[in-house]
Amino acid sequence: MATVSVLGFILGSGNAAAGDARRFDVLQQSSAGTKQPIDDETVEKYRREIVAAPRNANLQIELARLLVKRARLPEALEAYLRALALRPDSENIELALAETYRRVHNDDEARKILQLARRQHPQSIEVLRAVGSLETEAPYADPAIEALKAAVKARPRQAALKRVCAGTPPPTE
């Protein structure tokens, strides 16, 4: 059950029912413990478990991750959206959803999700970093600079952020 507890903590939940947690743990072990490629059978296992526990956001998130790995991005977007509906204040789901939108070249939707995340989590370094990354690739340099400055201001001693703002690569060792 440690897998579920850690993942629940990372995803900000920790409130899944015991039965849902056991189901999730079994699925997590079956898909994470192997180095084999993820097949359609694994995806279908998650879909069956979601039918049995439709309110379990962790199952939706893991299904979305599997679908991203299988390059089934439209289905992954749907799973992330269902997870976000179950847990609307989850920064990690918002970031994953925005990244998936970027993978399908829908920067406008990614920008909307990141704006929502920024309103909900104004002090989040990860959200500010994602906004800065998105905006530097778009013709919106001013918002990118402001987001990156805010990230540095929030964590002034983090050298990696300062390098990103300065546009310099990390040192090679």
Image (tube, rainbow, N blue to C red):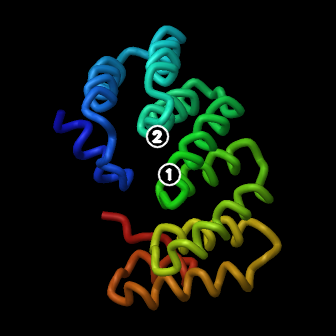
Q: Which mark is residue 150?
A: none
Can you give x and y, in whole percent of width and height, for residue 45 in the image? 45, 14
Left/right of residue 12 with respect to residue 164 in the rendered view:
left
> Image point 74% across, 42% down: which residue?
104
Q: Is residue 34 above or below residue 91?
A: above
Q: In the rendered image, which residue does mark 2 sit on? A: 57
Furthest toward the left, the residue is: 2
Of the pair 21 and 128, the residue shown nearer to us: 21
Decide: few, some or many residues near mark 1? Use Cα within 10 Å; few <14, some 14-19, many ≥20.
Answer: some
**Mark 1: which amino acid?**
Arg
Of the pair 78 and 162, the residue shown nearer to us: 78
Q: Is residue 70 above or below residue 1?
A: above
Q: Which mark is residue 87?
A: 1
Number of marks drawn = 2
> Image point 31% across, 17% down: which residue?
30
Where residue 128 sits, quadrant-wise, is bottom right
**Mark 2: which amino acid?**
Ala
> Image point 63% across, 45% down: which residue?
100
Quarter of the image with the N terminus in it: top left
Mark nearer the N terminus (1 vs 2): 2
Cα–Cα gap, marks 1 and 2: 7 Å
Left/right of residue 28 with respect to residue 2 in the rendered view:
right
Can you give x and y, in whole percent of width and height, for residue 15 in the image? 31, 47
Can you give x and y, in whole percent of width and height, for residue 165 in the image? 55, 82
Would you say the residues marked 1 and 2 are in contact, meaning their CB atoms lie under 8 Å apart? yes
Can you give x and y, in whole percent of width and height, for residue 89 in the image? 51, 61
Where residue 70 sits, quadrant-wise, is top right
Secondary element at image label 1? loop
Secondary element at image label 2? helix
Q: Is residue 15 above or below residue 144?
A: above
> Image point 35% across, 51% down: which residue?
13
